Amino acid sequence: MSGTPSPVADPATAVPASPPAVRRRLPLGSLAYAVLAAALVAVAATTPLSGYALNILMQAATYAIAVIGLTVVLGLCGQINLAQAAFFGIGAYAVGLGTVDGGLNFWICLIVGLGLAVVLGAALGASTLRLGGHYLAMVTISFQQILTLVLTNWIPVTHGPDGVPNIRRPALFADGQSYLALCVLVLAIVGWLVWHMPRTRLGRAMRAVRDNELAAGVSGIDIYRTKVAAFAVGSLLAGLGGGLFAGSFTYISPDQFSFAESIVFLTMALLGGVGSPVGAVIGTALLILIPEWLRFLKEIPGLYLAIYGLAVILIVVFMPDGIWGFLGDQVRRLRRTRPAPPPAAELTLSQGEASTAPMLEVSDLSKHFGGLKAVDAVSFTVARGGIHALIGPNGSGKTTTLNVLSGLYSPTGGTVRLAGQDVTRLSPHRRAAAGIGRTFQNIRLFRSMSALENVVIGAERPNNPLGAHDRAALEARARAALAFVGLEGRAEEPISGFSYGHQRLIEIARALAGNPVLLLLDEPAAGLNSSEKNALTVLLRRMAAKGLTILIIDHDMTLVSDVASHVTVLNFGRRIADGVTATVLREPAVIQAYLGEDAAAGPAASLKTDLAPV
Amino acid sequence: MTPAATPPLLEIRDLVVRYGEIEAVRGLSFSVGAGEVVTLLGSNGAGKSTTLKAISGLVRPAAGTILLEGKPLEGLKPEAIVRLGVAHVPEGRRVFPGLTVRENIMLGASNRSGLGKRALRDEVEAMFDLFPDIRRFGDALGWTLSGGQLQMVALARGLMAKPRILLLDEPSLGLAPVIVQAVFAIIAEVRRRGTTVLLVEQNARMGLSVADRGYVLETGRLVLSGDPESLWANDEIRSAYLGGRAKAEVLAAG
Amino acid sequence: MDLILQLLFTGIGIGSVYALVALGFVLIFRATNVVNFAQGEFSMVAAFLMVVFAVDLEWPYWLSLLLTIGGMALLGALFNLGVYYPLRHRSYLPVIISTIGASIFLANTTLALYGPQPQVLPPVFETQGFLLGPVFLDSQYLLIIAVTAALVAFQYWFFEHTLVGKKLQATSQDKEMAALLGIPVAGMIMLTFVYSAVLGGIAGILVAPVLFVSIQMGATIALKAFAATIIGGFGDVTGAIIGGLALGIIETFGAAYISVPYKDAFAFLVLIVFLVVRPQGLFGERVAEKA
């Protein structure tokens, strides 16, 4: 494959010839699951159960659906949502009011309820544009409280505190037994879907946002849309559970969908393990069944919930991953290893049309923080191909400049053009789409994922001309990138197993997998020992040899002078030198910037020797 | 090179400090005698600030010993270490933005007990004699001050602790050359009054101008040491900062 | 016009209660970066303690008051040790969830110990109040406003004119630097929790005669206090006070002119509007203030 800039690569040859079609693993897991689910449904439909037991099981099943929704928004995407009971209630009331007051068909009401829940959930998710953390928690609580108030007080519509009795089930599932079977079936389907979600593109995006939002953005993920999607899915499932709940219990009232219930859902998720639907089911089952066995606790009002509250604190302090989180680790270790994949192909980087125009043009770039001019009217260009370094003493504005270039800060003034395109105001993920890749000084990898998954996310960046949509091709490209940095054999390992130096390489591989046209490296040598630095130098040269344009910030002057052909020097936010590396590093202004002024005044006069040029 | 006979005020032996997996300081040994001003030089990432943080207790060393007049400091909390007389003026000044200059300086005496209100106020006023340029800002809030003023306040605050040794981290950082001159003039005066100072600086010129001795660090190791004049004249110092063909070798301390 | 003045008085009265709770809440946030979802429960527990001492045991008011405040100080200390301290290095999510758990635990333990019946705490003064022109000044509301003003003045004096107050401010603004100077950070944080619990408790004792003393009162007051801090600008002390007063007034006028059952909704609506439109609140632009 090509190593020098070439005309637009012929798609047929650009993607490495696929390795002999990796046979889709026989979905043994899914088959087993389907069998188990079918068995459970059959049992539910046929085993004679008392009315009481039916009620408990139906409650457990419908609650579990809502709690699984929480594992999506909270567990997968890391966004706090304390209004799950509100969406549960929306689904329930849609079914209740629709069938009783409107006389409509159960299924239609259920679908309307789902639609309402999704829309409102997405609206709530939309608030994440501006808010996160405790602000978001408060918005969700407020939403929950407002809904409770509406349900209680809008009597003409919702019947107020009296609630809605005599909800009719669909004709097909009119008796308790078959309705339970329906709930179990829906739960099984939902569980399966959510089980596979982490491995879908959206699921990966959610996990990336949870693990490291900044890195997700620069890898091309639309953070905001991902969060909205997470909320939408979470509330969809809550609405589904609520609608089914209404049909199971056949009576609903506002206090079943209060803030306290949202906490109950949260506790169930935390206890079982917020990371997976299995945890959700475990947590729900435990917290519904145990109190039934300890029914005496309900005799004293408040004791039951007081224990809930205490349980929440204890779980958060001592068992943050929940029961399944703990067990799941053990299970994962037992899983058989996958067959060794075929050797990865050579990594290709398509650089687009050859041109003498500069890759990056920075004009009069400024970034002010209040009165502080961190970057002050800096201009420089980076030619296509090769390595350009941006250096300067501590506090000179290099890192700020890099952050402006990758979109993490918006500039106070000036423009940035990438291959002629104005990218000055683009958000980080759009810059990634335009072809800017970047690594971080303090290494931002997605810690819950393997090396391979990290790199696959890089490969998924939008507008990647060498990208693909099917899993096999993405993985192949990711493996090629890992092979390029020498880590192919350890692709499946989790990040925590890699040394610092190797983690840095994985971050570089992630950026390379996205086929960037401009790669920004933020202090890639930081924290590396000398042999690692040598290896890095070699790697950088190989990357440049493929025609990649690299802009590097670093303090290690040996590294810089070894790899960079051009260098721009900043001091106090201003450009003080720019040109061929060897020449620039000898300029007096540059030497002074690093070692200090030669000024004769003051105590410095005691040092009489002049600084002779090297 | 070391002061004869009397044991050093501060002694560092084989210090190793890690941030996760990265070794920021790899086996550093040096000492500071009473009344001396010692400067640690080196480019960014050399481990200078980390060394100071290990001494003042902000980070815990992975290995090695830190002795203040023979008393080990490793593992003690910062509150305890400052009470023993080690005052750290950190990188970036960190003047409390919502408190006035006077209040900031006053809090510098938090490590001393038994100081009455009047005595405290008098000491703060006396401190302004050393820092006349900021006297008129006495009631100004921290966030309104410029970098140079902040550096003065931070220095005054550090001196209020009546420290046995003052740790100064990159006082010239982010300051214009003219301001740096003023700040170092004060450091020179502090030196004249006999305070022991361990100074960390990227600006080698200024750092050496007030020092009795200097050490140069590179990626966590000591590579050069000596008196200011000979260090400044040494080619190696330039390669430690700017890379190049002259590769530094590790020298024994002293 | 008469009605407006009357509503204004009531609004300021109830707003003072919100301001007090909001104050305690903001202080904890500034010192520890923790949003304490159990702040309202401090008020609720104090109100119940007063009922136990002053009504059930019929002990003298001043004694009951002292015991309750002592109890709140103890509660604040335990809260610090049990809920904040084990999680002080973790991210915001576990801490939020933990304080929510604490809030539920406190509310329901009280319920389990005392029972669900709302209680009545009689007002402090025998006389109900007096007329000032067209406005009837309820004595309990007057007390609320007076005590709040006194506490705000005390707090101002404490933070501005005592060394400990300065040390607390320093801890709030830069914990690590405070430690470097020798300020006992853990002790400062403990002091903050104790003080905030007492503030919340006083608010509860003041407002109890006006509402019923019930298990739910904590949650309602807390959310109003959150709304107040958002309006004022999250983390800003003056903002919390002004936000509390403003919310009290908005709510009172809203109940009178728009709807009574949805009175509580106003707080939440205001909260959402501010969070979406102006998350930094009214005073959010100001750089770090004195506490």
Image (tube, helix red, strand yellow):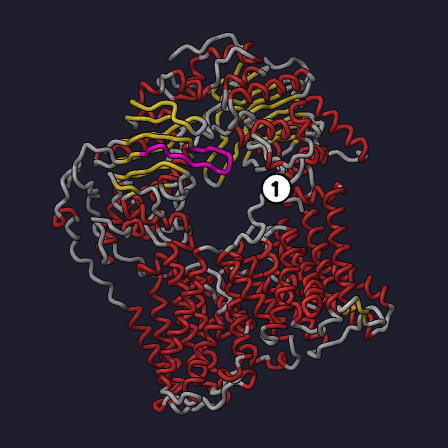
The type of residue carrying mark 1 is: Asp
In the picture, measured across the screen, residue B136 lies left or right of residue A579, that is: right
Residue C288 falls inside the magenta stretch? no
**Location of residue A91 (image quadrant):** bottom left
Query: What is the quadrant of the C terminus of chain B in the image?
Result: top right
Q: Residue at x 45, y 33 (%)?
A: A374
Residue found at the far front of this picture: C1
Residue A289 percent location from the top left of the image: 52, 78
Please report the bounds of the magenta region as a residue range. A362-375
Query: What is the quadrant of the N terminus of chain B in the image?
Result: top right
Front-lying residue, C135 or B151: C135
In the picture, measured across the screen, residue B203 lies left or right of residue B85, that is: left
| Label 1 neighbour load within 10 Å: few <14, some 14-19, many 20+ | some
Residue A365 falls inside the magenta stretch? yes
In the picture, measured across the screen, residue C34 lies left or right of residue A427, that is: right
Residue A236 percent location from the top left of the image: 39, 71
In the picture, measured across the screen, residue A197 lies left or right of residue B23, that is: left
* Residue B24 versus residue A127 in the image, above or below: above
Residue A217 percent location from the top left of the image: 37, 49
* Residue A112 seen in render: yes
- Residue linked to disc 1: C174
